[in-house]
Image (cartoon, rainbow, N blue to C red):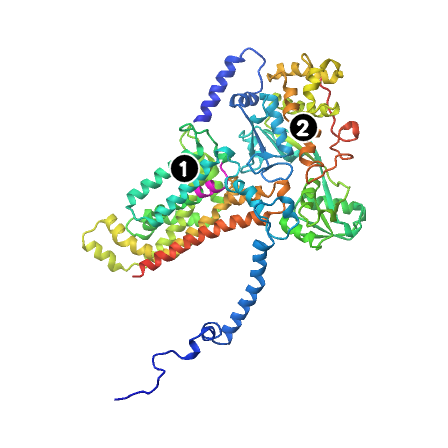
Amino acid sequence: MKRIATLAFGMFAITTAFGSQATAGPVLDEIKASGNIICLVNTNSPGFSSPDSKGVFQGFNTDFGRMAAAAIFGDASKADIRGIGFSDSMKTIVARKAHMASRSITSTGTRDADPGLVFPVTTFYDGQGFMVANKLNVKSASELSGAVVCAEEGSTTLLNIADWFGNRKMDYKVENIGDKTARLQAFYAGKCDVLASDFTALLSDRQLASNPADYTILPEIISNEPLTLACQPDQELEAILFWGFQVMLTAEQYGVTSQNIDAIIKDIDKQPKAVRRLFGEKGATSDMAEKLQIPANWAYNIIKQVGNYGEVYERHLGESTVFKLVRKGTPNDLSSRGGLMYAYPIR
Amino acid sequence: MIHRSNNHIGTPPEAEFCVFGWMRKNLFRNTFDSIVTISVVLFLVWIVPAVFSWMFLDAVGFSGDEALCRSSDGACWPFMREKARLILFGTYPYDQQWRAALASVLVIGLVATLIFKRMRVKWMVLLWAVGAAVFVGLMFGNVMGLPAVQTVKWNGLPVFLLLSVFSLAAAFPLGILLALARHQNNYQLLKNLAAGYIELIRGVPLLMVLFMGLFVLPMVMPRGFFLEPLFAILIALMLFHAAYFAEDIRGGLQTLESGQVEAADSLGLSYWPKVLLIVLPQAIKQSLPAIFNTLIGGYKDTSLVIIVGIHDIISTAKMAYSDPDWQRYGLEAYFFVGIWYFCSCWCLSAYGRHLEKKQDN
């Protein structure tokens, strides 16, 4: 009853307040009316989304929900970050019970073809990798012929392994252990030579060894898993998510961080044109803000309250964390440094 | 007069008198007994020092930090200090967690009144109804100036107690009604309906009943009435446990001598007084072990609600050790949860034994 009343009031408020202007998308209207954006994340994904000791979700994925809230409301804390409930986040979004999901969902063709769900932007390029013990003295996955691989029967992991080893005509044996904890124990006990899983999962699994330094993650990534945001279909919402992310990439490209952005704004006339377009008074971003009906300084809010992409990455997955995930040389680096993070021009 | 000069009359044989005598009588009476004793002792010698050193000797004390834990083999008690609130209350807003704590204590108090205080059924039902309303009011807020907290943020102990205690408490009367309906012969349709319901519920897994509850129940609600998923699950659990209680009680009803019912009829008691005064007390006494079995089993099965996205204490325990800095301490998290389960199930079981002993007078 309350929800219907809120929705009705929201619709009423919008039709009276914005009646004559360009109609924002219905989902964005609903978000603005309810005062926060519902973002679904995984409840126990170390580094990507897990609650801290106070019960507040922290992680790489949660920061993108906060980015959306900072853009739409000017306040990153208006993101209602929820651990996923029943039926994965995709079905919840299709059922219109949540607005977006930042959940390490791999964007695949079949998922994208479903109506009711859109994947606006990829936030992390992951893939499948291998972990071996240092004492095997294996430096590359091409030396793994004849290895015993720990993986889960029926998962795409095994299919990828079959493809990869088959293409190189290498032998391998599979140690099929369904439960993740049992698999890790088998690997650390030496029962199998290689552990195969998503690269980021391997990183967090390595921390569970009694001595993580004894294990290496091989450099080869044998499958593509682009981890994307997902949201309800709504042109304005998708634009906000996509361009919000581009703002974060562009800011990193030009060295704008949450720490120095205030100083940069004071000195805005001396900055490169691209930075002026992002944060200046009459830049491209304020033009977009008018069309999307979000606060004019949305780009500033994103960078100030959440940070640029590099900051978010370092905060949750970087050198200062237990993961020590090196960004250089991986697809997650900026395109100017050889990675796949390509900042679209904002003009 | 026969006079025995045996001065051992009145004292037990020496072999049973002192410690060794006791051991010989109770632990080493015959070969099989001796083998069992030796095996158990060996097992204890193997396990108890290991557990003791894990829990106390090698463990890092409460005031330690993660770095200390990493270098030690024993339990990491700083993990508990750090994460106890997360495991108990999950993602409930931090500054409002006193409400969740109070609500949990309230439910435990309600159960305690059931166990320790004798009161008329009417007052007990009223007390529980008021208790349930206070629980929901406390947790949900939006009354008396308390900020609202949606049900998706209810995690951990309060939600677990809500789902287990209230579903089992409500299922018991429903189970009694079903058992009575199935046991009588006067109204065949009612009997078949009850039997059909019981067999249907017993024939499907609990998970399926939960899914059904989540999808089907909101559809049968009147228009405009929004049923929170949490309460849909509560109702589904109640319907599930009712079927199992019904069968337990029906077992007790079957042990009742027909003479009891006939005597009640001859006294002029109509149906409900007969059932409440004569039939049920005897039937329930007979089915106490079965009832407590269902109770304890149902209490623990509540954890399955994680599949429908409700995060009870086992799920929040998993959340606790998915913090990147504390990933290695899953055992401590589950140990904490295990202690809770063990203590509460032990208390329930002890109460069951007490009730059985009380009846045997």
Residues shaded magenta: B154-162
Q: Which residue is mark 1?
A: B135
- Is the stretch drawn in magenta largely helix, strand or loop? helix
- Quarter containing the N terminus of chain B: bottom left
Between B227 and A268, the residue placed more toward the observer is A268
Q: Residue at x 45, y 48 (%)?
A: B299
Subunit bearing disc 2 = A
Residue B357 vertical position relative to residue B336 in the rendered view, above or below: below
Circle 1: residue type: Phe
- Looking at the picture, how far across and down is residue A324, in whole percent? 72, 39
Residue A16 vertical position relative to residue B139 in the rendered view, above or below: above
- Looking at the picture, how far across and down is residue A291, in whole percent? 62, 15
- Residue B161 part of the magenta-drawn span: yes
Examine the rendering and report whether any part of residue B227 can be seen.
no
Between A5 and B254, the residue placed more toward the observer is A5
Q: Which residue is mark 2?
A: A121
Q: Is A93 positioned to the left or the right of A215 in the image?
A: left
Examine the rendering and report whether any part of residue A41 can be seen.
yes
Label placed on residue B218: none
